[in-house]
Structures are given as C-alpha cells and as structure tokens.
Amino acid sequence: MIRFDNVSKVYTRGARPALDAVDVEIERGDFVFLVGSSGSGKSTFLKLILREERATSGDIWVAGRHLNRLSNWRVPQLRREIGAVFQDFRLLPNKTVYQNVAFALEVIGKSRRDVKATVPEMLELVGLAGKERRLPHELSGGEQQRVAIARAFVNHPPILLCDEPTGNLDPGTSVGIMRLLDRINRTGTTVLMATHDDEIVDQMRKRVIELKGGQLVRDQDRGVYGLETV
Amino acid sequence: MRLRFIMGEVWNGLRRNSTMALSVALVTFVSLTFVGAAALTQMQVQQLKDAWYGQVEVSIFLCPPDSYEDNCAAGPVTTAQEDDVIAVLEEGNVSELVDTVYVETRDEVYENIVAADDSGVYAQLEPEDLAPVLRVKLHDPEEFQVVADATAGLPGVETVYDQREVFDDLFSLLNSATILAAALAGIMMLTAILLITTTIRLSALSRRRETNIMRMVGASRSLIQAPFMLEGAAAATGGALMAIGGLWLAVRYFVEGWLTSSIAWVDYISRDDVWAVAPWLIVAAVGLALIASLLTLKRYTRA
C-alpha cells in the first residue's frame, strides 16, 4: 500500500537530510505507529506520502501509484485515496459538524444524494449522531477530532494518515480516539499514525516504525514506544 | 454538485468580503468609465468625420486674369486647359478616387462671392475678373492629397484647396481628448488590476484554512481557484455594469438632452452607441479579473 525504496529528502542543498535512505513497506490493512523525536523526519515522511513534497532520491509508491512519476494534475486523485487527520483538527469554524464532513465530499464532486446518505452514517460511526448542527467551537477537543476523522474517512480512503491526532487531547479522550482509529483499521483501512504518545503506543501493541535523524532505526511488529533497537 | 458548491463558495466569499468586493467594483467602474468615454469620443469623432467629410469638397481654383501665382504666369486658364484638368480627374489615374466633378462657372463664382459679401469690398468685381472653380467630391475624402498632387501644378491651375482643413483643428482637439481619455483609462486599468490582485490575494489568504482542506481531500486545483476567479469576475462585472449605466446616463442627459438642443448642427452619438460599447466593457472587466487572478492564485493556492 505504501512503499519507500531508499528514499531521501534534502530541503536545502548541503543541509542534513530530513529523511536518509529510508526503506519501508506498509501493507494494506496495517496499523503502524510512526515514532521519533521532533525533527526526526516524521512530518517529512507523511508529506512525501501526500505528495506535498517530492523525494530528493529513491522511489515512493502509494496506493499503486509511483509518486516520482505522478504529474501534478493527478495529485488530487492520489489525495482522494488518503484521509488525513491533524493534531489541530483543521475544521472550518463557520461550518457545522455536518457541513464540515459534507465539505470533503462536495469538493470532489459527489452528488447531493450521496452526501445525504454518507455523512450521517459517518457521524454515527464516529459517535457524533445528534450533533450535526453544532459548530466546532461548541464541541470538546475529542469531539472536534472525531469530526476531523469523519471528514478524513467519509470518502472511505484505503489509507488514513494521522499526524499526532491525540496531541491536543487528555489521556481519557485519546483512548476514545484510538478506539475509533482501531475500528476504522478493522474495516481494512491502512492507518499510519505519527505520535509522541508513548502510553498509547505501548497499550495498542501495533507495528512501530521509529525515525531518528531522518534514518529508520526500528521497524518492529507489536512494538512499544521507547525501545531503541535497530 | 460542483457548480452548486462553487457558486455557494462565491456567494460566501462576496458576502464575507463585501467591502473588498465593493472596492473592486468601484475601481473597475471608474476605469471602465474612462475606457468607455474614450471609445465613445472616438465614435463621435468618426461620426463627425463621416458626416462632414461627406459634404466637403476639394476645390481646384483655376487661373483668373491677373493672378500672382507662378503657375498662372502664362495668363488666365484656357478652355483647353480646363478640359485637360477635368480629363485628369475623370479619366486619369485618380479617376477611381473621384466621385463627381462640378464646374462652377465664372458667373456662379461671382454670385457666390457677392452673395456672401456684406462688406461691399467685392462689389467692384466683375465675372470676367474671375476663373471657373472645379468642385470635386471624392469617394474617400482622406485621399485628398493624391488628388491634390495629381492636379496642382497642371497648366491653368492656381491652387487646390481642401475644405477639410477647416475641420482639422476640431478633429485634432477631439483626437487629443480621446488620447487623454485612453491614457487615463490605461492608468486606471493598471490600478484596477493591482487592486483586484491585492483583493484576491487577501481573499485567498483569509481562506487558506479552507483551501488547505480542499487540497487535502483531493479537490482539483481548478476547483480551488474557481471561486476566487469568479468572485473577482463578479465584482468587476458589477463595476462594468455601473460604468455602462454611467455612460448611458451621460449620453441620455448630457448629449441627447442638452448638447443636442444647444448645438443642434452636430450629429451626435446616441444611447445605441453605448449599447455597442457595453459588451466590450464587460469583456474587459472579466479580462481584468482573470489577469489579476492568474497573477495571484498560482502562488496562493498551490496544488
């Protein structure tokens, strides 16, 4: 589903690479934690998958597409295969819960009937049924993140990228979010989650990829957060 | 669905940035009013030329007795010389340019001069002191110089006179007015492009969160840019409509209402001419907005 072949990324010539010869493969339906300290290359890793950045060297395949050869006008198609969730939720403040989720379908040209059928289903899945008319500021942090997840998943993309989705949430709320992501993963969706949250990683016991200084230093099935072995 | 979505975004954008939309509409209004005024002035000049040049003639004065002109040193024009000049006009190289040649006889010339003379200065004149004048109408009065070159200097021709010279000062004044209006219009158009560029940039910046989300969920670049372009185009079109309205009112009340009754002998432009200019002003407005959008959006709504 996602494959990095000897991928490096250098932002400015002469500087230390943000990613350095990374080889990794993530299969369909995997749940993977991407861990590492700030500046280790996690964000670059995610940006490369979304084709927000291009690799300096090496090859990247995502959802059957060779990103090195993907023309700019095909990038939107790639992004429809990837849902993205962020630490700061990134909701539209003047749109209701329903409208925020519907927005993702409207901009890719789904019919009104599709939107009407899919959005309530998705809000039910994330546990927000009955709160369709609320505005984001009327929701708790956890609820806002659920809206963001609903928006990312409403199109049923095969890949869900989560960049610190629990970073702004208290531990109790984070558990709820992780349960939701686990549930989405069980539908066959590949989930790749960048995180600093050691408790969650230790509890979930999923595959862990660790980056350090741009290099892949650990790729471990059923791993924990802090173990540093190569 | 997408069209609905885009129109919804355009409406929201205009509503949220109503003051910016108004400023774009107003600057477009002012600049296109200048453009329209320049176009209408030029149309007026053309109309006057068509009307007046159609009436004016080239006059070929033949040599009278006692002329001081060098070309008349041999004495007054003879009938043979007169026939030669007419032959050049009607059968020579310039015949294609000539519409009609009318020979004003000595007696007619005399009558015209005396009739127009209130002072009595010409009362001493006799028809025999004068020479016939050839009044030549051209198909295209602009070709005067060719006809003048072909006839001036022929034996028996004293001078060739183009009545257009009477109007040339007026036309050069009107042409200067057109150039001035066009120059102002150019500056105003540039101002409009700069202002629309800034407005669209601010609009794109203020909606960055929205465009980022659109990008993330796979909206195409054209879909992301379309609302901004349409907003600019809508505001500019509003300006163009105001300009058309302004020009219509000016022609209706100033030209048709006042000038026509004050200086009646001139053939003026009408409201029909405003309607002829109107579509071009709308095209110019949309063009302005599109140029401004292209200058701005590439940078602020990347793929």
Image (tube, grey):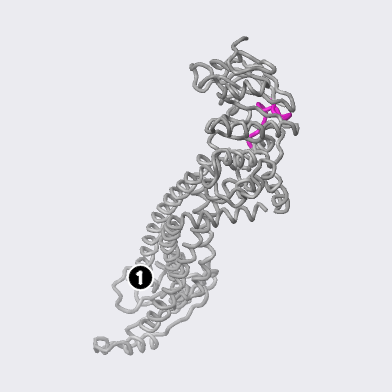
- Quarter where residue B219 is shown: top right
Q: Can residue A108 be seen in this view?
A: yes
Task: Looking at the picture, tell me which residue is in the foreground, B99 or B252.
Answer: B252
- As drawn, is A196 to the left or to the right of A153? left
The structure residue drawn at horizontal position 53% and vertical position 15%, both measured from the top left corner, is A213
Residue B196 at x, y percent in the picture: 45, 52
Task: Looking at the picture, tell me which residue is in the foreground, B143 or B96.
Answer: B143
Q: Does the magenta stretch include residue A89?
A: no
In this view, B242 is above or below B226: below
Q: Is residue B134 visible?
A: no
Marked residue chain, label 1: B
Count of numbered tags: 1
Quadrant of the drawing holding the N terminus of chain A:
top right
Quadrant of the drawing holding the C terminus of chain A:
top right
Residue B124 at x, y percent in the picture: 26, 89
Q: Mark 1 points at which residue?
A: B170
Residue A199 at x, y percent in the picture: 59, 23
Q: Residue furthest front?
A: A172
Residue B87 at x, y percent in the picture: 51, 73
Kindly state the secondary structure of the residue where label 1 is placed.
helix
The structure residue drawn at horizontal position 67% and vertical position 31%, both measured from the top left corner, is A70
Task: Looking at the picture, tell me which residue is in the foreground, A54 or B96.
Answer: A54
- As drawn, is B215 to the left or to the right of B295? right
Judge the density around disc 1: few (<14), some (14-19), many (≥20) Cα neighbours within 10 Å: few
In this view, A50 is above or below B245: above
Residue type marked 1? Leu
In this view, A82 is above or below A16: below
Q: What stretch is highlighted in magenta?
A: A61-72
Task: Looking at the picture, tell me which residue is in the foreground, A113 or A120.
Answer: A120
- Quarter where residue B103 is shown: bottom left
Q: Does the magenta stretch include residue A67?
A: yes
